[in-house]
Amino acid sequence: MSESYTVQQRVNELRDTINKHNYQYYALDDPSIPDAEYDRLIRELQQLEKQYPELVSEDSPTQRVGAKPLAGFSQVSHEVPMLSLDNVFNAKDLRGFEQRIRDRLGRSDPITFTCEPKLDGAAVSLLYRFGRLERGATRGDGVVGEDITHNVRTIPSIPLVLIGDNFPDVLEIRGEIYMPRVGFEAFNEKARVKGEKLFVNPRNAAAGSLRQLDARITASRPLEMCCYSVGLVQGGDLPNSHSDILMQLQRWGLRINSEMRTVVGGDECLDYHDGLLTKREALPYDIDGIVYKVDDLELQQRLGSTAKGPRWAIAHKFPAEEEMTKLLGVDFQVGRTGAITPVARLEPVFVGGVTVSNATLHNRDEIDRLNVMVNDTVIIRRAGDVIPQVAKVVMERRPANTEAIVFPQQCPVCDSELIRVEGEVVTRCSGTLICGAQQKEAIKHFSSRKALDIDGLGDKLVEQLVDEKLISSVVDLYSLTVEQLITLDRMGSKSAENLVAALNASKETTLPKFLFGLGIREVGVATAASLAKYFGTLAALQKASVEDLLSVTDVGPVVAQHVHDFFNNTSNFDMLNILHDKGIRWPDIEVKHADDLPLAGMVYVITGTIESLGRIEAKEALEALGAKVAGSVSKKTSCVIAGLNAGSKLTKAQTLGVDVIDEAEFIKLLAKY
Ligand code: D41
């Protein structure tokens, strides 16, 4: 066997494996291996392709991003036009749609429909020839679109080659490319911090990302594809219902919407509608409605199309997630850590299914970026469970009586000076402990469910207690008496007793909850849990240096500094002592440091198949013993575990003189501990 033959085999094997994992991940939404393992496969393939450039092929999973930007877009004619969709906005018109279909078909029995979410992105066409992605195009006007092949190739959920077999020689897929909400928010957040241009909504973000001449830009955007129909089909057959076609597309590795259902009759369409409308906020992407389609292809053909779109399909639109309204004024709120947030007061507007009268303006830069003024007409966006945002000012409607928004110099609550640290976007109140707003927010946070979980101490009550000067920090909570509490408005003796009992009960807590409750900047539930697990006791954490803190999982320099600052502040030190004296307790946590584990400091590499364990378990077993598991062999490797059919890594280990053990020895090693 020649060397290049085995390398070619390994390359093919890697490509197959990667494509199968892509299928599991994107088409089935059921990842079969951890991301880190996937990355290792990709890296191994990249490495081999770099070493043997003659083995690079255009549809290799490593070849998604081309090197050179295009000079311009070329036009693409859609051989089968991409039709548009007619709309309905209510149940009555939907029943009208169903009735028209029945009349045309001369049928009295109910029709079977597929229902699928109407994604709010950009409609595209993908042309596969002999299973290889040949061309991607925008819908354009439905007849002529633009060639965006270089960009669609960068989208991970679009397979470069179909998997399985029996696909038609020519298969044109239609679907929507969209940006999931989390990706959109993250993209805008980054752009906001850098002072760059923001996208108004995920639809614009998707369309804008596809309209790039440089595919590297598209590749950096979190885009996904979801398929909803086929266009041109030649040299092969597809099933004879829409739902079966989609299921078949999924088996070939294409992504379809997991919310798709087949229902019988208009009533069930409406049930689906109500169900999805309730779920709308929880979906990870924006939808603007539902598309109902007659499932049977023969019936579709008999129904045909009009200029507005097919007679066999209709979009049922949801309430819009963007609406216009007037900006009445701006308030400045003070958060737990003193951050000042400008909040837009709006003429109430129904958007995304609720009436909105406030929207965040984030910070001072955001006001400048939007160039927004009081009395402006603004576009409010409320999608998912994200707080409503001011997306844009409608400049054409700017009235004569606008007023500039003046960012205050002093805290609106305690009058302390506001400060903005160089390079940070947030403006903060410097009053920390004396600021009533920060006191209230800190106490609310401390008593919240994920922290000390003080039953009956709601936000309103905290505000009342601070306003009445009964408390000004969390330590005061534990001095409250029934006699003091009953002096409050709407507080009976029973409620007062219950609250004192709840305060006492809250003293038995856990270290993670307590740490979270302290409200240290950037320390959420997960970080609090990591800190507790790593240090085990509060005393150990109080003594930790920034460097110690950096060893904790998920703690980066910023968080480490915040934690360190918090524990080295004398007022905080006093507060912690008092809380301890008041009887707040938690069980200590036993800490196991990686340094004490038997394989600490060792770097293992696993290659080939480990039959008795599987790679993931093998890796986990090693890590549990304190070892690191790396993806490639280097001089730093302590030992290579060579399973069945071990390949290039074994050769490399032998060349470098690294220790090699086989599966049997590996099992013996594990058994030893
Ligand atoms: O999710 C969508 N945006 C979506 C759009 C969908 N799920 N199905 C669609 N089906 C069609 C037909 C019935 C014409 C095949 C569509 C669209 N059309 C469509 N998207 C943009 C214009 C038309």
Image (cartoon, rainbow, N blue to C red):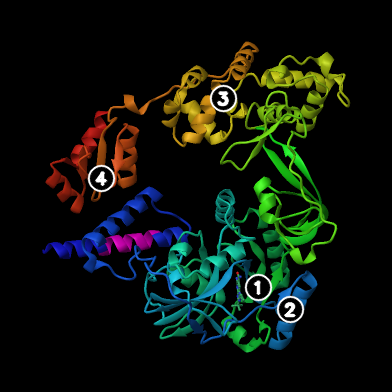
User: Residue tagged by mark 4?
Assistant: 606
Identify which amino acid the numbered label 4 is placed on. Ile
Judged from the image, the secondary structure of the residue bearing numbered disc 2 is helix
Compare marks 4 and 1 and give the one earlier in the sequence. 1
Q: Name which quarter of the figure residue 628 lies in.
A: top left
* Quarter the N terminus occupies: bottom left
Judged from the image, the secondary structure of the residue bearing numbered disc 4 is strand
User: Residue tagged by mark 1?
Assistant: 292
Compare marks 2 and 3 and give the one earlier in the sequence. 2
Where residue 237 sits in the image (x, y, percent)?
A: 45, 82
Judged from the image, the secondary structure of the residue bearing numbered disc 3 is helix
Identify which amino acid the numbered label 2 is placed on. Phe
* Quarter the C terminus occupies: top left
Q: Pointer 3 and pointer 4: residues touching (CB < 8 Å)?
A: no
Count residues near mark 2 (Cα–Cα under 10 Å), then give few for <14, some for 14-19, many for 20+: some
Compare marks 3 and 4 and give the one earlier in the sequence. 3
From which residue to which does the magenta span run? Answer: 12-21
User: Residue tagged by mark 2?
Assistant: 97
Q: Is the magenta stretch mostly helix, strand or loop?
A: helix
Query: How far apart are the two marked residues, 4 and 2, measured between alpha carbons?
Result: 60 Å
Query: How far apart are the two marked residues, 3 and 1, measured between alpha carbons?
Result: 56 Å
Where residue 191 sits in the image (x, y, percent)?
A: 56, 53
**Which residue is located at x 64 percent, y 53 percent?**
282
Residue 394 visible in this rendered orientation of the protein = yes
Circle on res. 566: 3
Q: Pointer 1 and pointer 2: residues touching (CB < 8 Å)?
A: yes
